[in-house]
Every structure is written in C-alpha cells, then in structure tokens.
Amino acid sequence: MIDFKNVVMEYPNGTVALKGISLHIEDGEFVFIVGHSGAGKTTLTKLLLCEEKPTSGHLIVGNYDLSRIPNYKIPHYRRELGVVFQDFRLLPNKTVYENVAFAMQIVGTPARKIRRRVPAILNTVNLSDKHNSFPEEISGGEQQRVALARALANNPKVIVADEPTGNIDPEMSLEIMNLLLKINKLGKTVIVVTHEKELVDYYQQRVIMIKDGVIAEDRVGGMYE
C-alpha cells in the first residue's frame, strides 16, 4: 500500500514541486505516472525512493512513514523497492550474472541462495543465455532487462521504473513493458514513470497525470493530451 496524504514538497529556493497531493495505490496495482517535464513526476519519484522527504503531509509505503523515517531505517526500506532507471546503471566490469548477484551480495544474502535465485531471475527476463556477457556486449534492450532483473533480485514488494524505455527502441520498449506486466501479475506493485504517450495508450492501465504539482487526472485508460 502506498498513500500520499496531502503531500507538499517545497525546495529551499522556493519552488513548490508538489502542492498537497493525495494518492492511494493498492498492493499489486500497475500504475503509470505521467506529466510534462517539470510537472512533479521526478519529485514524486524521489520521495518514493526516500531521496527527499516531504515538506509537509504524510507518505506511507507499507509499514514506513517516509515523512518521518529516521535515516538509519532508509536502507531497510529501500530493500523493499526495486528500481529501474532510464540509464540502466549497470556495473561495466561485471557480467550479467554478477550485476544481478551484486544486488544480493550487498544486503548479505548467502551465496547458496544467490546461486539458486539469480538464474531463476534471468530466466524470468529471458536472459539465461547472456549470463556471462558484459554490458557492452549486449543491446540496450538487454541491458534494461538486466536492470530489471537486478531490481527483482531481493524480491521487493514494489517496482519503480523511472522512464524505463527512454533509451531503447520501440520494439524493445514493448518487451520491457510486457515484462513489467508479467512481474505485476506475480503480485508486485509496479509504478512506471513515463512521458511516452503511445505506451500508456497501448496498455490501458491506471494513469495518474501530474500537472503543475497537483494530480490533474486519475483514471484507467490512455494518456491525456
């Protein structure tokens, strides 16, 4: 469960990026967050990732109140999130397998569990045959699938995909979106932040449009003009 309750985000320079938004996302939902540049999408994402804290209001994710969370608890909270970025952020000197395994190693997962889980995740994203490849040896779409596999590594409850198709071609974009839908059907909450109208229109999921720091629309269907 994700609850924004009258969340305001004002930056030190006086810019008010979010103007008292209230929003509820149920466990297991698939949601698009859309809006033009500067609308507040990036700020909303940063709040979810606990990179910023709201100026006022409450942001509840599961058992955490992110408006009041102490800094020492933030790493524990982030383990419940899987994040996919536009620029992949893979480690260039590690193979596909090692990139996914590393996400588990840094949280202290036993080696035996890593050896069992990583191949299963790579199979989920159709990359079993690329496990020994380095990022520079695979396509952009395949790199984004590695990033998605890494996001799944620690079995998070929520996947946040920030412009996940921004650096790949249209065919690969559909593949990534289909994988995100597959993951959603496994019970994960999936939030996709995007500006790509064609994808949003095609998939006909819940769409939340942010405009000038407020929620302008919240409905099931395509993106708005």
Image (cartoon, grey):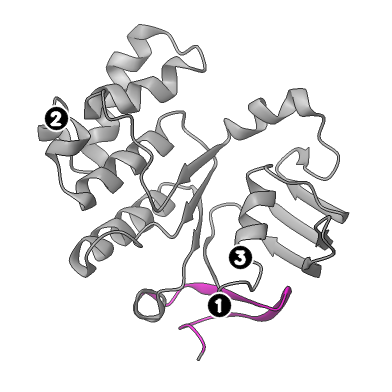
- Label 2: which residue? 133
Q: Which residues are magenta?
A: 203-224
- Label 3: which residue? 41
Q: Amino acid at mark 3?
A: Lys
Residue 8 is a magenta residue = no
Q: Secondary structure at mark 2?
A: loop
Q: CA distance from mark 1 to mark 3?
A: 8 Å
| Residues at circles 3 and 2 in contact by the CB criterion of under 8 Å | no
Mark sitting earlier along the chain (1/3): 1
* Residue in the picture at 75% in, 38% down: 63
Q: Amino acid at mark 2?
A: Ser
Q: Amino acid at mark 1?
A: His
Horizontal and vertical percent position of residue 217: 64, 82
Q: CA distance from mark 2 to mark 1?
A: 37 Å
- Label 1: which residue? 36
Badge 2 local density, few (<14 within 10 Å), some, or many (20+)? Answer: some
Q: CA distance from mark 3 to mark 2?
A: 34 Å
Residue 209's place in the image compared with 146, above or below, is below
Mark sitting earlier along the chain (2/1): 1
Q: Is residue 225 left or right of residue 216?
A: left
Q: Secondary structure at mark 1?
A: loop
- The one nearer the camera, 75 or 15, is 15
